Amino acid sequence: MLSIEPDIHPSPKVTQAIIEATQANKIRYTESLGLFSLREKISAHYHQNYNVTTSPHRIALMVGTSGAFLVTYAILLNAGEQLLLTDPAYPCYKNFSYLLNNQAVFVPIDETTDYQLTVEQLKRYKNIKAIQISSPSNPIGNIYDSDVLADLIGYCDKNDIYFISDEIYHGLTYDIKAQTALDFSDNAIVINGFSKYFCLPGLRLGWVILPENLVRKAEVVMQNLYISAPTLSQHGALAAFDEQYLVQVKTIYQQRRDFLYQALSQLFDIPVKPMGAFYILADVSRYTQDSLQFAEQLLSQAHVAVTPGIDFGQHRTQQFMRFAYTREIDHLRQGVTRLCNFLNA
Amino acid sequence: MLSIEPDIHPSPKVTQAIIEATQANKIRYTESLGLFSLREKISAHYHQNYNVTTSPHRIALMVGTSGAFLVTYAILLNAGEQLLLTDPAYPCYKNFSYLLNNQAVFVPIDETTDYQLTVEQLKRYKNIKAIQISSPSNPIGNIYDSDVLADLIGYCDKNDIYFISDEIYHGLTYDIKAQTALDFSDNAIVINGFSKYFCLPGLRLGWVILPENLVRKAEVVMQNLYISAPTLSQHGALAAFDEQYLVQVKTIYQQRRDFLYQALSQLFDIPVKPMGAFYILADVSRYTQDSLQFAEQLLSQAHVAVTPGIDFGQHRTQQFMRFAYTREIDHLRQGVTRLCNFLNA
């Protein structure tokens, strides 16, 4: 159970679109910023879902959100300049910055701020060039409060700090809707993609929304690093905004979240109830102070796959584990049973 | 005419394989090194085509050869270390090295060595960590002589220099067969992919063959930068080694090469007869000393698209233009007619 890759298929409209594009031999490169028709669809998605107006010219298709992070950091930060990250956070952020010889600066976050970076914390750091957050977040599944997000983005705007918002788990939000950073400022840089909500990880297709003056820079870097995003993926993604289907995807994840949150709450302290993504971060300190060893034990002895907290940073991460609800409830139930047996043994 | 993106479709077996994989919803991530079955196919391809034995465990799938260059440079070179490139060369090599804060060192090459880097030249440079060449090359279309390649690789082996061989145009060779660098040393690093010979640029799928001790490093960097190469592309590529079809592709390009080389020889000096890839590098100095301006004139006045030499470096590149034979002969003929009219006007 609890393997981290989701088991939900994409909309059949997407697979049909890929098949048609393949039959039509649409496998040349696209323009580096991506098919303009897809950039228009994404623009329309922001209008419909957030009531935000963003020109398709500000949207660039990327090779996954992975590609979006690399290109974004490359155009924003020179070697040695500081990128501020939370600890814990998605582990690859820091690795992109290492590759580019940026300096990653880590701000510890925990339940004292509901795992949100705040302006108060931010003010302690000098010479920050850019900030990377995610909401809903990996590994916590929390969603930033509207006022916290507004304060952060306002502070960044005032202090010439680039604000990068990883919104890859948007759509997978269960109690409140996540706001896009574009709600607060057109200077915010938004990264999203088709791997999570749209159930299309293997397409390796993401996007970044940039202030107008950065688009050409992104195009140049994109062209040199990737030429263009995979072509059939782009044609498939044209059919991905299938709202009727996506509502079902969200409902499935919400049911899993409800089940697993309730079940794990009996076994562990869960500092923040996850409201998005497909993760639960649990405090396992009543059982261990070594999350990696605990993960190995759970895997080898209980046959349950859980990600150790230390994969996501150093701030109290030895006492946390990340559970993923990327399998159907019957599997989750079996996993919970195994966990109970292991912990009570 | 002469637009640089090829017009030849891939083998129908590939499109069929992609359709079947799509119908089976094979769109999760793959392992970061790629589908093992595809790595085995590539290994078999080396055995059949070069009589070279290379374990599939040494082969890593990448997001295009673009991804292969980035990952390879990232694992071989620290910031400030020197990557030796030829001038002219494929322009993105240096841009990958700039991104990684490596130091790109340029060795001018020209007709005095048949546009080959030689050990004699190489000896003039100190503290080189890695060398990047391509054969057949972009923009020249020349193929390295066996003894030049043997000397280079032998020198690199002796002096602990990584030798990186871009073999993306292998298969598209018309007079002699290109040898893989693996013929000379298992320390050589070979980069290739499905965009040229296999006619699948939009798949964004390449590979790198590494010495065993570098594979795990490549896996770690690949995983962080890309997660994995596009999944449907990998399934399609399983059917790409369709020798019967590929022979036809090669024949088409060879006929175009023969036509365009003969035609352009009437108008320009061509220092090296191209024996591979789909480019001809022509000395246009009897008409101009400004290749960019000449390219603009040809485009706007003669309606012929040609790439200016300066895109590929600084060594005498103002007097060269790169012609691509990526369109059918009727189009090439029309382009040549337009060129003649323009030059004689």
Image (cartoon, coloured by chain):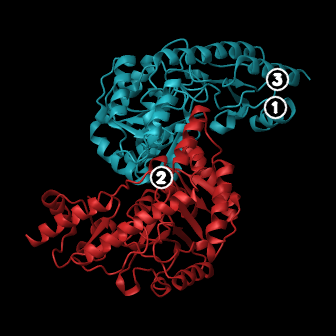
Chain colours: A red, B cyan
Residue B98 place in picture, x, y as percent: 53, 50
Q: Badge 2, how many Cα within 10 Å: few under 14, some, many 20+? A: many
Q: Is residue A201 left or right of residue B140?
A: left
Query: Are the residues at dot 1 and dot 3 in contact (C-beta closer than 8 Å)?
Result: yes
Query: Are the residues at dot 2 and dot 1 in contact (C-beta closer than 8 Å)?
Result: no
Q: Amino acid at mark 1?
A: Leu
Residue at (44%, 42%) from the top-left corner?
A: B231
Q: Is residue B271 left or right of residue A202?
A: right
Select label 2 or label 1 by which is in front. 1
Q: Amino acid at mark 3?
A: Leu
The residue where tag 2 is placed is B100
The residue where tag 3 is placed is B339
Q: Which mark is residue B298?
A: 1
Q: Is residue A320 left or right of residue B287?
A: left
Q: Amino acid at mark 2?
A: Leu
Find the distance from the CA under tag 2 to the CA under tag 1: 36 Å
Please identify the quarter of the rendering in which residue A88 is found: bottom left
Observer-nearest of A49 and A233: A49
N-terminal-most mark, 2 or 1: 2
N-terminal-most mark, 1 or 3: 1
